[in-house]
Amino acid sequence: MSPLRKIDHDVDFCVVGGGIAGMLAAIAAARHGLKVALMHDRPMLGGNASSEIRMWICGAGSRVPYLQETGILEEIALENMYRNPSRNYSQWDALLYEKVRFEPNITLLLNCSCCQAKMAGQSIASVTGFQLTTYTWHCVRAKLFADCSGDSILAPLSGAEHRIGREARSEHHEDFGLDQADNKTMGMSLLLQARETDHRVEYIPPPWAYRFETDADMQDKPHTMLQDLNTNFYWIELGGEQDSIHDTEEIRDELLKIAFGCWDHMKNHGDHGAENWELEWVGFLPGKRESVRYVGDYILTQQDVENARSFADEVAYGGWQIDNHLPGGFRLSGKDGAHLQKRRLSEPYGIPLRALYSVNIDNLLFAGRNISATHVAFSSTRVMGTCGIMGQAIGTTAAVAIKHGLTPRKACQNKIRDIQQLLLADDCFLPHIARDITPLSRNATLSSPAGDADVLRNGIDRRFAGIDNGFFGKLNIPITYEFGQPVKVRGFRIIADSDLDREFITGNPNLMKIPMPLFRALSHGGTSFGFPQCLLKKFRLEALLPDGTWTTVHEADNNRRRLIRGTLDVVCNALRLIPLETYASAALYHTYGSGAVHLFSFEVQ
């Protein structure tokens, strides 16, 4: 057999880790023109959201109305709802694969574990990973690197400053801080899935599973998930009191004994309504919550999170509650949530770019469950919806930095407005920053027979703070920009209502905010929750030419995106959008009605 081969890759931007954060970082950078390599050590993308672990994507919108994360994440969610109505995990894996593998400018390296980093002073020059499926070493040279691996593999390989564990109260004066710092973390969970049948199903546990005959044997953990359907066995959790990286195999073995024992308890010890339920899947890869966190130019704190702080360099936001799983995990009592430390938030907080790049490695960015935050603040930022928009933020930052030949720090200092406006244009939401309106849209006259359409250029593309920020138009009634003279129109941008709070989507009400199922229940209406009926499906753009005639310049008849953009090349005196159809049926759709359309933005440039 010949020696192991080595393949070299030269790119602009290398992302290590293909979870939700890494995926969105790679896609965002590639769409802004960078040549990107994404190195991921698993056979499928998605990290904790993949079929290997099966945790649903949570975020600010899971807790605060209308704060659902948008941008690339909403694009993926809508496509999954449309193409995968039964919420099949194989189709979900395939969609995540498709979004990266077929995105121009991305080289995808699956089954490839990052093992080495070569330094050039205080910068990373290259990383090398071993691809198990091909017995090949892949060496990636890049201008900028992003660690979205969760466990922060580039920290030990590059010498980047990092920390593990919980801070003392004296360091940041946090309410939830400790009297004395320690190295304990939140644990990892091993999830299971079950499905309801129409007949009694027996269950015989493996002989090595733990036996929990009473609720007290399971430390009185909550186990109403078969009735609630929007929770899970998250409390099958260990590892917070061990090394959450190096002890993972040992922790996994213990979690398997607990998981099969818990299902034995549900089926065979007590009345839990599980008689007709069948164990369908058990994860063998634990879902990690916490391990290594990087240190950036700024460390996000509990006060920042609770006080809804805004930052001049805000590039993402959070809104998930402070959700601190105490290190004892499964061994702690579940009575009154004693195994958790929680505090709900009512408003979103900003996440600064300074918390997403290294304090001492010049060309290293990071996103996901490893950002520069205290343990307490991290307990809110760690959820995948928040991780995803941080990933899109650093991918966009990389594009701006490389365009101008800057480090992430210099880009933050000198080009933060450019980064923020690109994110807003790409349908990311920044709670404390409005999007700039294109000059052509701002200077034109905007009108519609259906009502005052000026809100379509207010720079806020969603309901927020009790204000709708949208235009309720009518199907077949135009929305028109008049320019007063012939002008060149090069493109358009529309933000359609995709029902971010998932209030009116048909199907199981318990699953509206969960993109992938935890359990499959026959008696609860299945696992599908339909597709946003308010979304604009079909529309036409018409231009008024200098000779006085109207002509169609763009048509769409199967739109599935909230952010709708297109290029044009027309000289005209006016341009109008004619919404033709939504996904609503003939029946009235909430307050909109089947003949109405709800839009948040329509601009031209």
Image: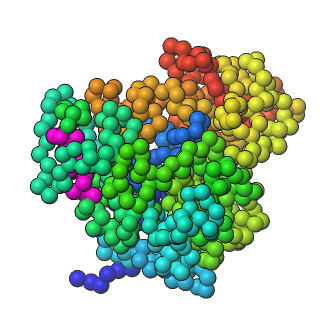
Q: Please identify the quadrant where the C terminus is shown.
A: top right
Residue drawn at x 54%, y 40% is 63
| Residue 410 location (% of width, % of height) | 73, 70
Of 530 and 511, the residue lying toward us: 511
Of 591 and 162, the residue lying toward us: 162
Horizontal side of 257 relative to 45 (left or right) equals left
Residue drawn at x 86%, y 37% is 443
Q: Please identify the quadrant where the N terminus is shown.
A: bottom left
Q: Is residue 108 above or below residue 55?
A: below
| Residue 596 location (% of width, % of height) | 62, 19
| Residue 425 location (% of width, % of height) | 68, 47
Residue 11 appears in which quarter of the rendering? Answer: bottom right
Residue drawn at x 53%, y 70% is 180
Q: Is residue 457 above or below residue 213?
A: above
Q: Is residue 221 visible?
A: yes
| Residue 595 location (% of width, % of height) | 60, 16
Main SS class of the magenta portion in the image: helix
Q: Which residues are magenta?
A: 255-269
Residue drawn at x 48%, y 78% is 156
Of 234 and 120, the residue lying toward us: 234
Q: Is residue 17 visible?
A: no
